Amino acid sequence: MNDVQKKNLKTDKRPYNYKQRSCPLSVKGAPEVNYKNVKLLRKYISDRGKIRSSLITGITKQEQAKVARLIKIARELALLPYVTTSTYKQSYNRRWS
């Protein structure tokens, strides 16, 4: 390795297994993102109804904000579920029964 490569290794702050991902919503031919497209929005919420972070989904911050806003609209229209707290209620009831 020459000196330039060694210098670049020291200044690179990314972890070793870091892989640059492309945003799946900004590629050519990507489906339109709106609150009516429930099938697409379901990819961005967990099985418990929580909105997944942009680190997990691999979308940009701007697209993440847009998706989060659309998920909230879809929840208001009863197209998507709100966060479920069933396991919390069960554990809470177990303590007092």
Image (tube, grey):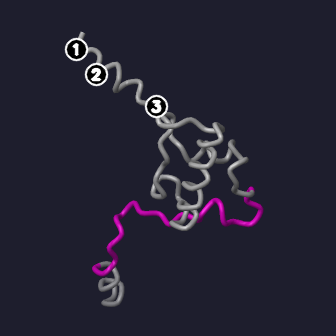
Q: Secondary structure at mark 2?
A: helix
**Mark identifier at residue 73:** none
Which residue is more in the foreground, 71 or 6? 71
Q: Position of residue 13 (x, y in %)?
A: 32, 73
Which residue is found at the position 61% from the left and 38% from the top? 80
* Residue located beneath label 3 in the image: 84
Q: Mark on residue 96?
A: 1
Mark 2 neighbour class, 10 Å CA radius: few under 14, some 14 to 19, many 20 or more: few
Residue 25, magenta (yes or no): yes
* Front-lying residue, 72 or 10: 72
Instruction: Name the amino acid type tagged 2.
Output: Tyr
Compare marks 3 and 2 and give the one earlier in the sequence: 3
74 sits left or right of 49 in the view: right
Mark 3, Cα crowd under 10 Å, few <14 / some 14-19 / many 20+, is: few
Quadrant occupied by the N terminus:
bottom left
**Residue 15 image point, x, y percent:** 34, 65
Residue at 32% over, 78% down: 9
Residue drawn at x 30%, y 86% is: 7
Residue placed under numbered mark 2 in the picture: 92
Q: Residue at x 36, y 84 (%)?
A: 5
From mark 3 to mark 2, how far is it between C-alphas?
14 Å
Label 1, label 3: how many angstroms apart (C-alpha)? Answer: 21 Å
The boundaries of the magenta stretch are 10-31
Q: Which x, y percent locates residue 84?
A: 46, 31
Image coordinates of residue 34 in percent, x first then y, are 70, 54
Kindly check if marks 1 and 2 are in contact, taking CB atoms under 8 A apart as contact.
yes
Q: What secondary structure prevails in the magenta region? A: loop
What's the residue type where badge 1 is placed?
Trp
